[in-house]
Image (cartoon, rainbow, N blue to C red):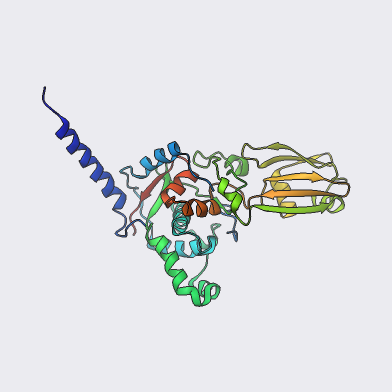
Amino acid sequence: MKNNAPIFALTLYGLTMLIWLCANLHSDTPVYAEMPAVTNEIQAEAPTEATTETEIQTTTAFVPSFSVPSKLEKYVIGVTAAEMPVYFHPEALKAQAVAARTYAMREYLADNNVDLLNIGQAYLSEQEMRERWGADFDENYRKIKRAVTDTEGELLLYDGEPILAAFCSASGGMTEQSENVWGTALPYLKSVDSHYDKKSPVYMQNVSVEYSLLSSYLKIKDASDIHVYKRSRAGYVLGVKAGGREFSGDDIRLALGLRSNDFYIETTDTAANFTVYGYGHGVGMSQYGAGYMAENGSDYTEILSHYYTDTLLCGAKIE
């Protein structure tokens, strides 16, 4: 019986080179929301098995049939600058750039004439960046632009299409599933661990509201019996009862200006005290979570694979 080991090794090498070539075709640079984000807002290590699975997908030999317009790359610089603090780790900024590009590309494919400045992502013009950063403009701009150019053309896909790449400032320790916020279950927007968010400066908020004001906000006679009766698996409030009526967690959040729907209520003789966790809708990538993951050694591909379940990271051509 002949020894087939040399043939097998050669075949394996050929496949490896093909995968590497596809992953690097899109760039000559070395690899270094309320939808999609909570505008004007600014962690969790992915389980080894889940990360490994998605890493395999990110190196799959696949090139989308569509191209990314060059104007979109310039737009992503402004979004990344607006949506994530410039002092965040470069790998977190790259994750933000990919998420912003993906969301915008989804909108662009639906309507080539879409006004990118009105699709729900915060944006800073170059002049606004100069005003915000002052003497640090050149250094900060280079950092943001590097995050965009290092990921040029990269998109997150599911079933061959750009995903709704939602992101939020910080979760309450776990991200939320899309159906609990927008009523539509998306397979890549699942609840995942994001415990690093507990370290973020926006993790907790305390709000006390006297019953008279609370009754006025909720348009009920007596709010002193307010209590949560239903939560999602991630801890976000799905149902509240007060004054003989039922409210969603979002109803309460909007009425009281709370940071998120992940809250707990303690009642006293005169007021309801709300302890709120996280900042934003909690769906998709946590920006602070991404920052802490990066600081703890995760690169942007690992960050993205953790927060966007079973997605494919692929490089598209620039037109």
* Image point (71%, 43%), residue name: 248
Report the residue that reaches farthest toward the left. 2
Relative horizontal placement of residue 259, taking residue 212 as reference (left or right): left
Which quadrant is the C terminus positioned in? bottom left
Residue 230 placement: quadrant: top right
Tell which of 5 and 116 is nearer to you.
5
Report the residue that reaches farthest toward the top. 1
Instruction: Find residue 155 and report its horizontal and vertical position in percent.
Output: 41, 51
Relative horizontal placement of residue 18, taking residue 216 as reference (left or right): left
* Viewer can see residue 181: yes
Total marks placed? 0
* Viewer can see residue 159: no
Q: Does 36 sit above or below residue 71?
A: above
Q: Does 30 sit above or below residue 252?
A: below
Instruction: Find residue 43 and report its horizontal and vertical position in percent.
Output: 54, 48
Which quadrant is the N terminus positioned in? top left
Instruction: Find residue 167 and report its horizontal and vertical position in percent.
Output: 54, 51
Tell which of 254 and 294 is nearer to you.
294
Relative horizontal placement of residue 53, taking residue 37 as reference (left or right): left
Report the residue that reaches farthest toward the bottom. 135
Instruction: Find residue 290 and report its horizontal and vertical position in percent.
Output: 50, 52
